[in-house]
Image (tube, rainbow, N blue to C red):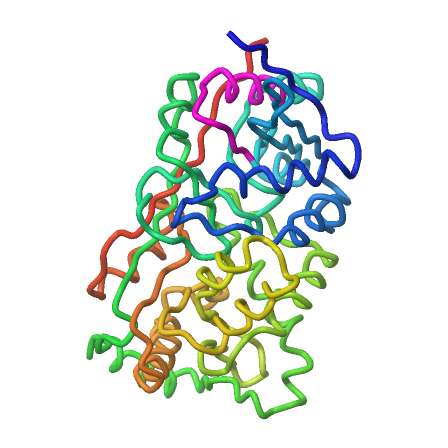
Amino acid sequence: MMEIQIKEVANKHDLRRFADFPTKLYKGNKYYVPALRIDEIHTLTKSPSLAYCSLKMWLAYKEGAVVGRIAGIVNPRANDLYDQTRVRFGWFDFINDIEVAKALLLQVELWGKSKGMNELHGPLGFNTWNRQGMLVYGFEAIPPINCLYNYPYYAPVMEALGFEKEVDWLQYEMNASQDIPEKVRRINKLILEKYKLRIFDFKNKKIKKQLAAKFFATYNESFKAVHNFIPLTDDEVKSGASLYLRMISKELCCFVLDLHDNIVGFAICFPSLSKGFQKAKGRLFPFGWFHIVKAYFFYDTIDLMMNGAHPEWKNKGVSSIFHVYLNDSFIRRKIKIGITNPQVETNVAVNVWGEYDKREFMRRRCYIKKIQV
């Protein structure tokens, strides 16, 4: 048996190998969507989450070749919020060899144990803005760019190593231009009139300047009760605002405002960029940017990235407002397919898709294991 060597990522050369390994592992796989190398390296070295998270990265080698990678993360904000002592693993990829996976996970476990942790769970990132959840269903489909893809052999390896399911995230695929249920349209009209709500007009420059701060304030509040959610810090909000909100399109997003211009509910969708990212092959240059920009402007598939409502407005039918608004927009633009963002199975918000004709698209799993004392 060839010896497996585990080495900590210690320099820029190692970091490039860490970022590039999945591209080599999934070469020829028509479903895998590579992250942009520049984004991966930036996240792992300059993410605002590193202000409070501890991070270690390792590579696995056989005969001098990289055969696996893993990151270990201790997030004290998450542990304090949920009264846990857990170390996370993420950026976890490996060849079809259980010994490689075992050696990598053991490295995170030992590191976590040295920092007083008693449970190992993942795959997770620093927070819910990173890719998370191991794919356990939907291997013959192309995921959104913000979602992980992995080979079918990953999950059986986890189970063989003693990991158990903590929770699953569900994704659905649906006809984006299907007629919205009449029941939802009736509720929409009643809610707008009863509470004097309105949909944000993107031409209103005064409110647009305040949109990012208002959105993230509502975002942090709306997902407080969702499993594993960690409210974003001010620095994370600034980073998210510069990256995501500048990309929003009025045809694919809806912000519901009250009389005081506060965001009470929101829905954000993006054109599916997955095929553009596949053509870019993890690089912006020389032509990767062209494929991504083309996918942004010419599309018939969208990713339903996130939707929510401020806790004070939950169970008041606010979601019907953005469902109706966006449905009408999708029909006008002749959008064919909508892919929902992963939603944790314990979140009652998953039930909103019960009114629609849909199919389960992908299922992702967070695994957990006790660290031996």
Q: Which of 154 and 30 is in front in this view?
A: 30
Q: Which of 155 and 329 is in front in this view?
A: 155
In the depicted structure, whether residue 227 falls above or below residue 55: below
Q: Where is residue 94 in the image (x, y as percent from the top left)?
A: 51, 29
Q: Which residue is drawn at 21% across and 75% down?
A: 181
Q: Where on the picture, by quarter, is residue 318?
A: bottom left
Considering every residue shown, the one lying at the far right of the view is 11
Q: Which residue is drawn at 21% across and 78% down?
A: 179
Q: Locate residue 320 relative to residue 118 in the image: left or right.
A: left
How many numbered circles are shown? 0
Main SS type for the magenta part? helix
In the depicted structure, whether residue 197 falls above or below residue 310: below
Q: Where is residue 88 in the image (x, y as percent from the top left)?
A: 58, 32
In the depicted structure, whether residue 308 falls above or below residue 131: below
Q: Residue at x 20, y 79 (%)?
A: 182
Q: Magenta stretch? A: 92-109
Q: Residue at x 56, y 28 (%)?
A: 68
Q: Where is residue 206 in the image (x, y as percent from the top left)?
A: 67, 89
Q: Where on the picture, by quarter, is residue 303?
A: bottom left
Q: Which of 18 and 27 is in front in this view?
A: 27
Quadrant containing the C terminus is top right
